[in-house]
Image (spheres, grey):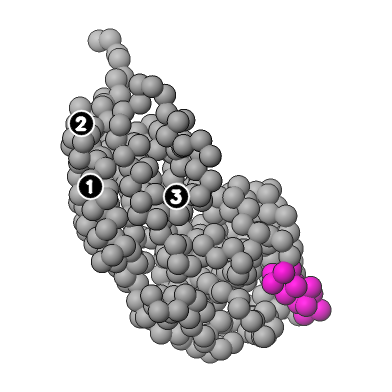
């Protein structure tokens, strides 16, 4: 099999491949997502890996339920989403705490550092508080070289200590999209 | 408009679906479906929900993907399935062959005062599943339809969705444990052994 990392364009940053390798090493089998540009390369690598079961969602809360089902069935999973999707998950996350499900989500931030779209800001600014209010452990990453090791430790506390965990990948890592407007 | 006479009794239906269930893995949506599967006989390989409305089908999909050799049956209500209607598209796109869903459709939000759901107003959940790519979809309302529906739910290459038009009215509540951590752990122990 060709390595899934070969789907990356030459100018791709290193951190999405760092996440991909970590997910493989941590035996993550089910990958669900609502796409975000920040997760583009990781999503492409997961699709290129025939050992990963990739599920495209219509809304992020489906991924929370899927993760619980995966664990009931004996598999580890990860939910990839943008920070705006965190708001869609709130009630479904009740199940993580009530049933003590391990859970890992990797959230690419919008409405964070230098956001150019005002509609993204309210949810982006509330993301960490919302996750913590629902009982998740939250790790935020601001430097590309920290992404892989942080995801690795998040997977460890999620699956070895059976905790719900979110890693927030900040816009300092991803870069803020430019919305150019005159006036 | 259908009448009570041409609608199914929910407890008789669920008992028929779960009799001699073998290795079937069962997820039940919150409210009456959770009480129904418990009345049919509580076992560790049943996971009844007390919350997480809209999540039953996707929990079933996670189990189905993790356990491709096992049959997974989700039993839920019309209100619960409508809240998670996007899951029909997600499941239709992924097409897990071992996943089946039975919607107990009384056209009402039974736990909250019997308000009409969308299915009472013409929305067809089986049609939505068919349009999403489910290869097997059926709507049943008579007792003589149950054996064929059971066969489809237990054995047809899926995903399968059966809408069972059930009578309104609430049977006596038969509660499973509400301890979610226990329900999760007993399911995993029974399915996976010591974990």
Mark 2 nearby-residue class (10 Å; few <14, some 14–19, many ≥20) = some
* Residue that numbered label 3 is attached to: A31
Residue A71 lies, in percent from the top left, at 42, 65
B159 vs B78, nearest the viewer: B159
The boundaries of the magenta stretch are B142-155
Q: Subunit of mark 1?
A: A
* Residue that numbered label 2 is attached to: A172
Q: Nearer the viewer, mark 2 or mark 3?
A: 3
Label 3, secondary structure: give it. Answer: strand
Residue B96 lies, in percent from the top left, at 61, 57
Label 2, secondary structure: give it. Answer: helix
Question: From this viewpoint, which residue is outermost toward the right?
Answer: B144
Q: Please report the residue visible at 21 percent of the width from the left and 36 percent of the height from the top.
A: A145
Q: Please report the residue visible at 46 percent of the width from the left and 42 percent of the height from the top.
A: A46
Residue A51: tell me if it is visible: yes
A156 to B24, vertically: above or below: above
Q: Nearer the viewer, mark 2 or mark 1?
A: 1
Residue A128 lies, in percent from the top left, at 21, 48
* Residue that numbered label 1 is attached to: A150
Q: Earlier in the sequence, mark 2 or mark 3?
A: 3
- The reply to whether the C-beta atoms of the residues labelled 2 and 1 are less than 8 Å apart is no
Q: Subunit of mark 2?
A: A
Q: Please report the residue visible at 53 percent of the width from the left and 72 percent of the height from the top.
A: B27
């Amino acid at each position: 099999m060709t390595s899934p990392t070969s789907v990356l364009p030459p100018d791709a940053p290193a951190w999405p491949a760092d996440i991909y390798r970590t997910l493989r090493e941590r035996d993550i089998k089910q990958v669900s997502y609502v796409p975000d540009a920040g997760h583009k390369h990781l999503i492409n690598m997961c699709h290129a890996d025939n050992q990963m079961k990739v599920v495209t969602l219509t809304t992020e809360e489906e991924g929370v339920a899927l993760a619980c089902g995966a664990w009931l069935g004996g598999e580890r999973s990860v939910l990839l989403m943008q920070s705006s999707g965190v708001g869609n998950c709130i009630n479904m996350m009740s199940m993580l705490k009530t049933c003590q499900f391990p859970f890992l989500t990797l959230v690419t931030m919008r409405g964070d550092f230098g956001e150019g779209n005002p509609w993204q800001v309210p949810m982006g600014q509330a993301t960490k508080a919302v996750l913590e209010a629902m009982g998740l452990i939250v790790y935020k990453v601001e430097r590309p070289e920290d992404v892989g090791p942080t995801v690795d430790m998040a997977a460890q506390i999620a699956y070895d200590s059976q905790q719900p965990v979110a890693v927030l990948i900040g816009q300092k890592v991803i870069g803020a999209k430019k919305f150019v407007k005159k006036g | 408009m259908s009448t009570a006479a041409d609608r199914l009794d929910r407890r008789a239906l669920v008992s028929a679906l779960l009799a001699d269930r073998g290795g079937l893995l069962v997820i039940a949506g919150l409210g009456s479906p959770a009480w129904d599967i418990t009345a049919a006989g509580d076992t560790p390989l049943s996971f009844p929900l007390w919350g997480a409305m809209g999540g039953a089908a996707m929990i079933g999909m996670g189990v189905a993907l993790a356990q491709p050799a096992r049959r997974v049956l989700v039993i839920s209500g019309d209100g619960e399935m409508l809240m998670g209607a996007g899951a029909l598209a997600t499941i239709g796109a992924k097409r897990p062959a071992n996943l089946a869903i039975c919607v107990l459709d009384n056209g009402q939000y039974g736990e909250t005062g019997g308000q009409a759901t969308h299915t009472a107003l013409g929305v067809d959940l089986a049609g939505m599943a068919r349009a999403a790519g489910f290869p097997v979809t059926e709507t049943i309302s008579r007792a003589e339809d149950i054996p064929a529906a059971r066969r489809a739910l237990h054995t047809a290459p899926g995903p399968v969705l059966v809408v069972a038009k059930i009578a309104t009215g609430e049977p006596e509540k038969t509660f499973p444990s509400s301890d979610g951590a226990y329900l999760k752990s007993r399911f995993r122990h029974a399915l996976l052994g010591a974990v």
